[in-house]
Image: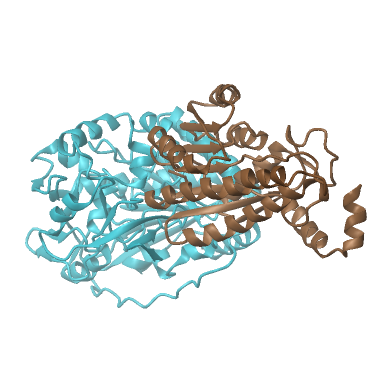
């Protein structure tokens, strides 16, 4: 069960090796009792698992999960529930940036990035949400991005997928209203992680632990939307209303 | 809020929502049918929803609404034995028995609790140092055990099941009725003495001295004003000699509206505490007062948890043995230094506990504080205070809790295993479940 500060006893992480997920789990360790890490690289998941287990008294299991294979997502949720019992928290943390986008990008590659990020999040979240509604409680956390509000050309498939995730997460929270479960969307700015390593940084960049702290705060305050850092919220509004020629100049850098 | 025939329920602190199918009990055979038909997530009884956390919630299962506005109440005016349905409220009982010269032996801080809820939480009152908690005043309980059978239990009749039910958080079954030994009174008034104190040591001194002379005692303490930490207003009370014996007709209390943000902030709490402390007489003063004013002052402001806004609040109530009295000051200082304002703090001394394995009171000092939820740092602070409390043999009151960690429960309640043993015997298929039970008491 989640406690009065939204702290879970059981959690399922989809994309269990993501830096944001690992940082969040370290902060959740005091109340966490059972954890399922799901992802593609079982070896890496096991390393994360032993790292997190050392932060508390936590039983960890790993599961194979491929965001690009939505036909297996319901099974993954069932397998996780078999180990966890009630699932208090589901963190949808996987994401793939893809190669730099241009007009020359293979359309199939672009569609694949959207399918993994957006399609995968939709099917996995829906399967998880159904489970949370059935058990009558629980929190689903989805990771969006400032890129959802105005994407740079080089990240366009990723940015458009994040816009889709953001929209889906807000609507899913509405759909969950009255079930006891809820959804929260986290909108980080530029985060220094292994996914963004080697990429041009942006103003107000944060590290994964700052995002994790914002997630913990959002759980405690039962937020629907969490901006991190907080200043990125007003910034997104400004970016969205910038005239196109100015945006092109800024984002090309 | 309903979806798929389910209702979202919360505790009094408005923090841990979950949904369940709410079933109303319409016939006397109702409970046993309901228990059998509940399904894999079981049932729990719910009274007036005054448990602060998730004790009377059962996510995905069944919650039995026990509140009975026309429940049966039978007073033996010769002996003072009152037999009441589990869903009858303390408020209704007082309205009935006080004009006849009787009062419940133990009155919790609100009159809006049911008999079943009061027993399941083994509630205490301002007179715990003299008479103990409600469990010590029961002649018998009619309990619908999970199999659906009704058994009559008491301190001399199936004592193990009786004491597991007292303070058992509803997990041994449904309390359909109970017989309580009332206390005779000669007036509906109390002589209340108010003493203002300048700091925590003085507050504790005054309480300790006064407990020997007075039946009821409690202290409001200020944990916001750091320069006079623990200054307080101590109230003592004794039932008055014969005189005016009418219970004052209850005025409809003002209602706090739903608020978009919390009104409980360091500034507002500081201002309130300053005014409340100054309003108290600077020299001890004794006055006649009424029962509800003395015992249930917060009932005078309906829906007061709404003051905390949408994030709600937590109440942290601990008890530590007398030997750990200095810890009260250390804890007060930690709370005062925390991010969240201590909106309400109440200090009192307990007398000895009773044989119930999950009963909260033990002889010593109990401190209850209300804190706004929402700040993650408050969760961390309370976790640390839990460690201090359990380290000296103290404990946290489960009826108030919404955030204790499971690993500490067995340390705080070392006789928890006795409840497990009884549940395994009378409830092998786990027909009684609750959110609190899943969060804290289930061991697999």
- Where is residue B132? Give x, y as percent: 27, 45
Residue A240 figure quarter? bottom right
Residue A229 in view here: no
- Where is residue B397? Give x, y as percent: 38, 43
Q: Nearer the viewer, residue B400 or B34?
A: B34
Residue B116 figure quarter? bottom left
Q: Is residue A17 above or below residue A167?
A: above
Asked if residue A228 lies left or right of residue B279, the reply is: right
Q: Is residue A212 above or below residue B48?
A: above
Question: Chain B is shown in which shade?
Answer: cyan
Q: Nearer the viewer, residue A24 or B207?
A: A24
Asked if residue B105 lies left or right of residue A90, the reply is: left
Q: Residue at x 58, y 52 (%)?
A: A184
Asked if residue A65 lies left or right of residue B152, the reply is: right
Q: Is residue B443 above or below residue A103?
A: above
Q: Residue at x 80, y 57 (%)?
A: A235
Asked if residue B213 lies left or right of residue A6, the reply is: left
Question: Chain A is shown in which shade?
Answer: brown
């Amino acid at each position: 069960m989640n406690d009065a500060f939204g702290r879970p006893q059981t959690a399922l992480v989809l994309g269990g090796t993501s830096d944001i997920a690992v940082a969040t789990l370290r902060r959740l360790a005091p109340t966490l009792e059972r954890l399922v890490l799901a992802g593609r690289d079982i070896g890496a998941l096991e390393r994360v698992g032993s790292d997190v287990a050392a932060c508390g008294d936590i039983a960890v299991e790993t599961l194979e999960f491929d965001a690009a294979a939505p036909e297996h997502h319901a099974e993954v949720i069932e397998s996780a529930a078999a180990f966890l019992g009630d699932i208090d928290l589901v963190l949808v943390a996987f994401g793939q940036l893809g190669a730099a986008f241009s007009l020359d990008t293979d359309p199939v590659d672009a569609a694949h990035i959207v399918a993994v990020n957006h399609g995968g999040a939709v099917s996995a979240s829906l399967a998880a949400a159904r489970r949370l509604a059935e058990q009558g409680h629980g929190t689903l956390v989805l990771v969006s991005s400032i890129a959802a509000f105005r994407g740079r050309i080089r990240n366009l498939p990723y940015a458009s997928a994040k816009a889709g995730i953001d929209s889906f997460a807000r609507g899913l929270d509405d759909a969950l209203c009255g079930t006891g479960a809820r959804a929260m969307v986290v909108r980080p700015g530029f985060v220094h992680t292994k996914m963004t390593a080697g990429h041009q940084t942006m103003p107000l960049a944060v590290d994964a632990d700052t995002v994790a702290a914002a997630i913990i705060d959002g759980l405690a305050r039962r937020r629907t939307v969490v901006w991190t850092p907080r200043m990125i919220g007003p910034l997104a509004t400004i970016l969205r209303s910038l005239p196109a020629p100015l945006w092109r100049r800024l984002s090309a850098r | 809020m309903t979806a798929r025939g389910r209702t979202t329920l919360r505790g009094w602190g408005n923090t841990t929502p979950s949904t369940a199918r709410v079933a109303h009990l319409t016939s006397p055979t109702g409970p046993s049918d309901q228990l059998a038909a509940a399904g894999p997530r079981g049932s729990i009884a719910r009274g007036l929803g005054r448990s602060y956390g998730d004790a009377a919630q059962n996510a995905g299962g069944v919650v039995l609404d026990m509140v009975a506005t026309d429940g049966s109440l039978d007073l033996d005016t010769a002996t003072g034995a009152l037999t009441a349905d589990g869903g009858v409220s303390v408020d209704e009982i007082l309205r009935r028995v006080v004009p006849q010269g009787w009062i419940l032996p133990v009155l919790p801080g609100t009159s809006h609790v049911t008999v079943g809820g009061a027993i399941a939480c083994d509630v205490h009152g301002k007179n715990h140092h003299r008479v103990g908690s409600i469990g010590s005043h029961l002649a018998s309980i009619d309990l619908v055990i999970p199999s659906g059978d009704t058994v009559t239990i008491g301190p001399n009749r199936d004592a193990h099941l009786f004491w597991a039910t007292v303070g058992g958080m509803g997990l041994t079954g449904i309390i359909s009725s109970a017989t309580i030994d009332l206390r005779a009174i000669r007036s509906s008034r109390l002589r209340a003495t108010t003493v203002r104190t300048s700091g925590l040591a003085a507050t504790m001194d005054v309480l300790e001295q006064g407990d020997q002379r007075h039946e009821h005692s409690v202290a409001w303490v200020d944990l916001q004003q750091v320069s006079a930490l623990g200054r307080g207003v101590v109230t003592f009370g004794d039932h008055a000699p014969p005189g005016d014996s009418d219970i004052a007709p209850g005025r409809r209390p003002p209602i706090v509206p739903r608020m978009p943000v919390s009104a409980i902030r360091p500034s507002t709490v500081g201002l309130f505490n300053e005014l409340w402390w100054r309003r108290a007489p600077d020299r001890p003063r004794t006055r006649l007062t009424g029962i509800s004013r003395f015992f249930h002052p917060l009932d005078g402001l309906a829906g007061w948890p709404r003051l905390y806004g949408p994030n709600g609040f937590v109440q942290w109530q601990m008890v530590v043995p007398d030997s750990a009295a200095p810890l009260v000051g250390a804890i007060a200082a930690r709370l005062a230094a925390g991010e969240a304002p201590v909106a309400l703090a109440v200090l009192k001394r307990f007398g000895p506990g009773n044989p119930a394995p999950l009963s909260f009171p033990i002889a010593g000092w109990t401190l209850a504080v209300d804190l706004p939820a929402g700040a993650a740092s408050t969760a961390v602070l309370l976790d640390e205070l839990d460690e201090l409390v359990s380290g000296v043999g103290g404990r946290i009151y489960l009826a108030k809790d919404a955030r204790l960690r499971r690993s500490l429960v067995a340390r705080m309640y070392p006789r928890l295993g006795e409840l497990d043993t009884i549940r395994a015997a009378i409830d092998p298929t786990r027909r009684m479940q609750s959110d609190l039970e899943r969060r804290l008491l289930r061991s697999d």
